[in-house]
Amino acid sequence: MVLKNRYWIVRHGKSIPNERGLIVSSMENGILPEFQLAPEGVNQAQLAGYSFQKELESNNIPLANVRICYSPFSRTTHTANVVATALNIPFHASHCKVIQDLRERYFGPSFELLSHDKYDHIWEIDEKDPLVGPEGGESVKDVASRLAKTMAIIEQEFEGCAILVVSHGDPLQILQTILHAAKKHKEPTSNDLASILEAVQVAPILSKHRQYALNTGELRRVI
């Protein structure tokens, strides 16, 4: 699998929902300003920006080649803005792009605005069958499908760039899962990214997404 760009990911900094122990996963709630970063999360986002700058310098990548792609939720938009400021690049410009499909995984009405303690039940469902999500919510496969589409779009739009994907815990775990599987995938008939990412979206692979968990504000090179 040959890609046109290099990729890093960062999970949003510690948010107000994180502090309050709340699941905020619907678009309707996720974009509310009261669910942006907590002060500690702002500090985490700044540190992620400085760490990313060091990565760019060590790889001789100019800031002109940086693109930040981020989820529309308030906590990810806030994180992307803080990172852009740390890098000294304009946020509302060609460098930064909001992508709807990088949004949080929707866990369904049975979990929305409830305690983080409910995550354990969701991950049990994922491990048993990642193709079936919580009632009214997205499965691991649902999220993998939209993230695969996002990767294809980014690869079409940019070339020779350092892409920083700013998203959420579950989506970034799932993204790493399919990208790592795609790197190992041997498909003699095609090097098409979309086809390869589709081929690896099978239960034995998707059910292991928790192994790629990230802390809030954590930066990671993926490809």
Image (tube, helix red, strand yellow):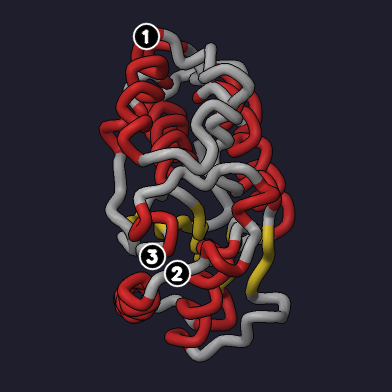
Name which of mark 3 and mark 2 comes first in the sequence: 3
Closer to the camera in the image, 23 or 127: 23
Estimate the x, y position of residue 162 in percent, counting from the top left.
50, 66
Estimate the x, y position of residue 191 in percent, counting from the top left.
59, 30
Estimate the x, y position of residue 27 in percent, counting from the top left.
67, 47
State how far apart marks 2 and 1 are (Cα).
33 Å
At label 3, the amino acid type is Gly
The image quadrant of residue 169 is top left
Residue matched to label 3: 13
Q: Residues within 10 Å of mark 2 (few under 14, many from 20)?
A: many
SS for dot 2: loop
- In percent of the image, x 34 and y 63: which residue is there? 217
Name which of mark 2 and mark 1 comes first in the sequence: 2
SS for dot 1: helix
**Is disc 3 in contact with disc 2, using a CB cutoff of under 8 Å?**
yes
Q: Please tell me whether residue 94 is drawn above or below residue 210 in the rendered image.
A: below
SS for dot 3: loop
Asked whether residue 62 is in view, the answer is: yes
Of circles 3 and 2, which is in front? 2
Label for residue 128? 1
Residue matched to label 2: 37
State how far apart marks 1 and 3 are (Cα).
30 Å
At label 2, the amino acid type is Leu
Q: Residues within 10 Å of mark 1 (few under 14, many from 20)?
A: few
**Is disc 2 in contact with disc 1, using a CB cutoff of under 8 Å?**
no
